[in-house]
Image: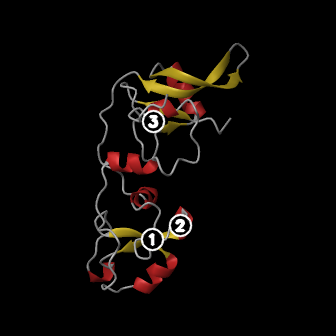
Amino acid sequence: MSSHPALILNADFRPLRYFPLSLLSWQDALRAVFLDRVSVVAEYDAVVRSPSTTMRLPSVVALRDYQKVERTVPFTRFNLFLRDGFTCQYCGDGFQARDLQFEHVVPRSKGGATSWENIVAACGDCNARKADRMDMKPLRKPARPSPWELLEASRHYPHNYLHESWVDYLYWDSELVS
């Protein structure tokens, strides 16, 4: 059962967050249904049973009340690697997330901040080679991405788990294929 999270949509049927994706455990989703905080939009085939009830697990739920959504992207490892296309910004090679590291363009020892504008993805070799140097420049100048830029980037790097019932709500602005 633990592998049945529910996608949370706002009252306008858009995800609360893309990065990280807004999900609830199946237990919390059922609790929200019973507390009348959400409406069930789609369900899994899996069911839970009590002595008096059998219920299908929700796969997509929508909040009953609209929540104002933050329009800034959280500064996380995954979001940074997604912004940089899972590519080392010094050698240009592509990597898995587990093989990338944060690299300060202006080293912390020289006053560099840990921010969108000063961190890039780097492979271990380039990170070690750059170290505290200032003469290595990244392929692209780092900048804070918009939610829409990360959404577009994510289409090239699908999530590890996207249930088929979620796709219509995650990519509502995608071109339809006939």
CA–CA distance in space, label 2 to label 3: 25 Å
Q: Position of residue 140 (x, y in %)?
A: 32, 68
Task: Report the residue that reaches farthest toward the top.
Answer: 52
Amino acid type, label 2: Phe
153 left or right of 43?
Answer: left
Q: Confirm or deny contact between disc 3 and disc 1 (CB under 8 A).
A: no
- How many dots with numbers? 3
Cβ–Cβ below 8 Å for labels 2 and 1? yes
3 or 1: tag closer to the N-terminus = 1
Q: Residue furthest right?
A: 51
On the image, numbered disc 2 is attached to which residue? 95
Label 2 close to label 3 by CB (< 8 Å): no
Amino acid type, residue under disc 3 in the picture: Leu
Q: Please give the residue where the numbered disc 1 appears in the rendered image.
A: 88
Task: Provide the secondary structure element on which disc 3 rests.
Answer: helix
- Name the residue carrying label 3: 170
User: Which of the two labelled residues, at mark 2 and mark 1, occupies the earlier sequence position?
Assistant: 1
| Residue that lies at the very extreme toward the left in this rendered image | 111
The secondary element bearing badge 2 is classed as loop
x, y (%) of residue 114?
A: 33, 68
Left or right of 1? Residue 84 is: left
Q: Position of residue 113 (x, y in %)?
A: 29, 71
Distance from the alpha carbon under mark 3 to that under mark 1: 28 Å
Q: Nearer the viewer, residue 38 or 12?
A: 12
